[in-house]
Amino acid sequence: MFSLATFLLLLVFGALPSVFDPARAYADEAPSDSARVIRVAYVQQEPMSPADESGAFVGYTYEYFERLAQYTGWSYEFVPVEGSGPAAYKTLRDLLGAGDADVAVGLMATQEGRESLAFTRDSFAALNVVLRTAAEVSDDPLDEATSDHPLRVAVIEGSPLASDLEAFCAQNEIPYETVGFADAGEARDAVLNGRVDVELAADMSDTTGLRTVVHMTTHPLYFAVALDNRALAGELDDALDRIDQVDPLFRARLRDRHFSVASPVFLLTDVEKSFVEGAAPVRVGVLSDQPPYQYQEDGQVKGIAVDILETVAQKTGLRFEYVAAETVEALDALQAAGSIDMVAGIDRDYSTANERNLALTQPYVSASYVLVANKSVADGAISGKRLAISSSSSYDGGFLGDAIQFPSIASCLRAVFKGEADYTYVDEYMTQYFLNTPEFRDVRIAPQTYEPRRVSLGVVRSDDTTLLGIVDRAVGSLTEVERQAVINGNVLRERPVDLGELVHANPAIALAVASATCLIVVLFVLIILGLRARSNAKTAFDLKKRLRLYALCDDSFFEFDCRTKRLIISMPGKGQQGLSEPFAFECDAPAVFDEERKRSFAELLGGKEHRVEEVRMPDTDGIEHWLRVTVDPVEDASGRVAHTVGKIEVIDEERREKDQLVARAERDSLTGLLNSETTRLRIGQQLDALAGGERGALLVVDVDCFKDVNDTHGHLVGDLVLADIARILRENFRIGDVVGRLGGDEFMVYLDRVGSTDVVLGKCDRLRRAVERHEYPGTDCRVTISVGVVLAHAGDTFDDLYGRADEALYAAKRDGRNRCGLADGALRSPKAAPAP
């Protein structure tokens, strides 16, 4: 029959891994001649003994036997048993009975078992019997059980734990029904699929996707030997007693190391999922200066705590936002104001947590303390020395030295570095973080045997503990690999080089480097100044030579440095002994020339081509002169213009003669108006400049009966009449209008950009009346004029307009003279517009 002892035997070796090297034939290291070999029988069942990276096996049972060997001197030969269930148990019993094994591991000392086996007096492990449900189920299935809907329990067929279930449910009046399964895997799948409510199991079995609802009872596990080998059981008891005397916590530590392993699977209950979906970002208070746990760098919060929270966020779906504070007091003020929901790190001390109204999660890091001291504690004696301690420390014991408080643990370390304190106590991770700084070289470190520092997340206490439960369980689910990855990423990361730290750590070297740098800079400056002085002297000498050369000429010469924007101009005959005397100004700053002249002259200096230009510019005496400027650029080796040299000549007389020649060529000698050719040219240019929508007006003016004037009064009076009419024309039109004499007694006027037709005809009437009223000195001669007018538009040609205006003129003459005729329009007579 499948007994409780059999079940526990299989369970222990299915869940308590032992260490066995597959390279060896089931034997521990080759025993010496004097070593006694103990054969240990165990069940070969998955998951049995996981191998480490070296190929050896590790586990609870193996470590226990090795600990026993320290006091017995034994070595071991391990005898695996294939299979499971009653057959495997019978094989173990047969091995002990046949003398093929000395010890069987993990049996309960039941009455049935004592009839065929001898057991040790003391147990080496304990097994807890539990009920488990799916991790996603938020309700307690035991509370939901009723007579109509009893608790459905998955039980492995033939499991001896069924009696524990029966006793527990009877005691607590819980109605239940069992559902049998062939193995633990099928039972667990049934719970996860919802076919049953809970499974009956031992706490050492696989918990993936499950959570414990209740612990029902506990069974001790013993070493078993054959009945005729009771002496070996006594030796085992003596060794067990010896271990309990010298190391009472050995069993607890061993169990914690091998069975307090987080499940890699994290699942939220339905209630927790609903909470996460509706939750706002959780506000987490972070200390800005507690590396590597929590700190600010480059405007971002970083540290172990922050990375742990980000891992929790990935597991749970919670969102976190961080609020930085410089001190614990500032953090408490934020909490009191309701500005934060959690703190990123708090030592696992319930008294301090209660004072700060915080609920603690499981620790996310555990680190040993070390003593950090500077040179003043070289001999290791700290009595009378200055201890740096954080103002938020919960330690309330005495001190060997004089305690000095600092705002944070990091500031305590810095105080030791700087000599403001002699020593302090910090954990190993913080110490390792600061070991990356150069100034840490001269400190001394001593590991301490105190209780390790454990750091938890703190959740502000509230009636709703859902957030605490989610974060607490998520932290507990972190594997050692996940935790260590976060720690390594923050402790071993490369820190940016801090010049201040380098100088503080190496003052002598820093002073030497600074002195050498200053010396090099001074020498470099002196060399530069010397070279510049030599260059300036050479430049001054070259300039002096050039000025002597310029003095031999009557013109002015200039040089322009394109890099410095400095212009030097030599003025002839203004220096000593009549030699040239230069003056200079910066083209980008006020100097001898005003802004407009500087701008005009600077434009001449641009470009890469040799050129000669004539400009009109006022001299320093305020009188404008015509200048001919010859510009010749000088390129450097790269092809860029580096200098511009040139000559300035005053050409007033030359320009005056040229202007007179131009005037004689363009003007009518009698009237001073533009001659016929120039008139046609100017009007053509203005017609070309007309834009769409703009209008001009062309006037052809003819003296009425001018031949009678010559015949009656003589040609001199005729010339006088023409000259006076020319003057009247100039007086009645704008400076920009074109006024010219076509020949004989015919004149032409072009009005640029005129308004309405009435305006043009009004101007013609005023002109006509002015001529009609005009008196000629020394004669009683009176003349009138007739005017032909045509409006010009963009695209019109001179010849076309001239022809149309001429037709309008002769139409006015045919109508009686002394009129203004508009091409394609009416005539305006003296009666229509009488003279005032």
Image: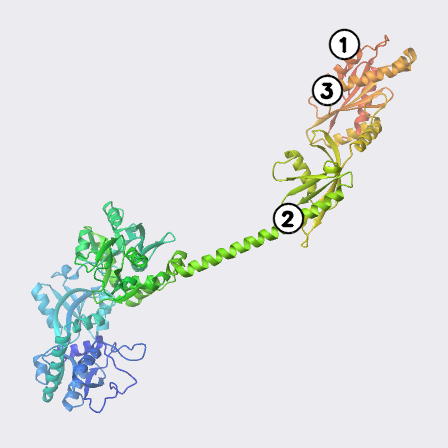
Q: In the image, which disc is placed on residue 412?
A: none
Q: Nearer the viewer, residue 369 or 264?
A: 369
Q: Mark 2 points at which residue?
A: 536
Kindly report the distance in space between the C-alpha atoms of the residues bearing marks 2 and 1.
Answer: 86 Å
The residue labelled by disc 3 is 760
- State left or right for residue 200 relative to residue 535: left
Residue at (74%, 11%) from the top-left corner? 833
Where, by quadrant of the figure, is residue 553 drawn?
top right
Mark nearer the N terminus (3 vs 1): 3
Check residue 831 in the rendering and tell me which mark sits there, or answer none.
1
- The x, y position of residue 435, in whole percent, is 34, 63
Q: Name the one closer to the observer, 424 or 114.
A: 424
* Residue at the spot 80% in from the left edge and 11% down from the top edge: 774
Q: What element carries label 3?
A: helix
Q: Residue furthest top?
A: 780
> Would you place residue 175 above or below residue 635 in this image?
below
* Quarter of the figure with the N terminus: bottom left
Which quarter of the rendering shows the C terminus? top right
Q: Position of residue 249 (x, y in %)?
A: 16, 71
Residue 651 located left or right of residue 153: right
- Amino acid found under the numbered disc labelled 3: Val
Mark 2 Cα-neighbour bin, 10 Å: few <14, some 14–19, many ≥20:
few
Q: Quadrant of residue 317?
A: bottom left
Pointers 3 and 2 in contact (C-beta within 8 Å): no
Q: In this rendered view, identify the residue nearer to me: 171 or 598.
A: 598
Mark 3 or 2 closer to N-term? Answer: 2
Q: What residue type is labelled 2?
A: Asn
Distance CA(mark 3)–CA(mark 1): 18 Å
Helix, strand or loop under label 1: loop
